[in-house]
Image (spheres, rainbow, N blue to C red):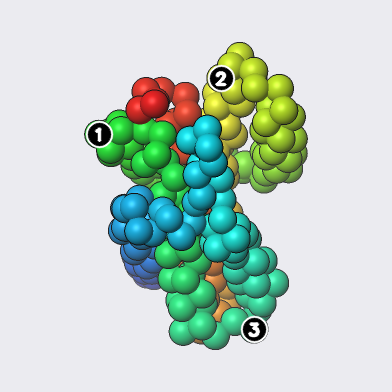
Amino acid sequence: MKTSSVAHTTRVSVNVQLREYFIKVYRFMSLGLILSAVCAFLGAHPPVLGWLYSTNVEGMHTLSLLGWIVLLAPFVLVFKLHSDVKNLHYSKAIWTFGIFSALMGLSLSSIFLVYAPGTIFTTFLICAIMFGSLSIYGQTTQRDLTSIGSILGMGVWGLLIAIVVNIFMHSAALDFAISLVGVGIFTGLIVYDTQRIRHLYERSTSTQALDSVAVIAALTLYLDFVNLFLFLLRLFARQRR
């Protein structure tokens, strides 16, 4: 009876610690999304748009040199965070994630050139509800999702190839298919990545290392959220122009 009581107490303690860890991950992710939203809103104003985009004689918006830097810099920061994860200091991880979120927000300001603000806000709420439900499932499911990780990874690469191909084809049907598949892939990735974060926590033996890993986990879920949001926006939203 005493052994059973100790085991129960241990399980409760582990569950509480895991919940606190996920709260920390979600807090970082939420702060990143808020920072991105603020920067996207500010970036949609004419003075900033003038720095990020140039307009040709046909009225088409194209990226300026600064715009290309803002667009590509987040990819460099993501690579930096993932490559240095074992030696990454907690404060450095937070600052890098903050800079990444700000730059991502600026690069996403272009959606205000295409979609109405009300449509963006509604799609964001739908995405948030979907994300919350999927991530809770990823935390609680007992099904091992490891096998679908590689399938989803290949799906992302296939999606990127299809997007590049459609830049030249301009096919509305292919664009719809890409959006539909994109929603499906990132729906799966939210569940898979949430479970993977849980497994990383359960296997970790260092509290200090977990702090930095929490930032990387927040970055992973942030990217899943943003990509799901963008594909939902392409799939359902009405274009302003």
Figure check: 133 above or below 78 = above
Q: Which mark is residue 118?
A: 1
Q: Is residue 189 visible?
A: yes
Q: Amino acid at mark 3?
A: Asn
76 or 88: nearer the eye?
76
Q: Nearer the viewer, residue 215 or 36?
A: 36
Q: Is residue 148 visible?
A: no
Quarter of the image containing the N terminus? bottom left
* Residue 118 horizontal side relative to residue 173, left or right: left
Instruction: Choose top left, top right, bottom left or bottom right for residue 178.
Output: top right
Looking at the image, tell me whether mark 2 or mark 3 is earlier in sequence order. 3
Mark 1: amino acid: Gly
Q: Which is more toward the observer, 189 or 206?
A: 189
Q: Position of residue 145 (x, y in %)?
A: 62, 42
Residue at 38 percent across and 59 percent down: it is 48
Please, what secondary structure does the residue beneath circle 1 have? helix
Rendered residue at 55%/63% (across/down): 66
Decide: few, some or many residues near mark 1? Use Cα within 10 Å; few <14, some 14-19, many ≥20.
Answer: few
Q: Secondary structure at mark 2?
A: helix
Residue extending farthest to the left is: 118
Distance between mark 1 and mark 3 Cα atoms: 43 Å
Q: Which residue is mark 2?
A: 176
Whichever of labels 1 and 3 marks the residue nearer the N terminus, that label is 3
Residue tagged 3: 87
Q: Quadrant of the C terminus?
A: top left
Mark 2 neighbour class, 10 Å CA radius: few under 14, some 14 to 19, many 20 or more? some
- Residue 193 appears left or right of 109: right
Rendered location of residue 106, percent (x, y): 44, 57
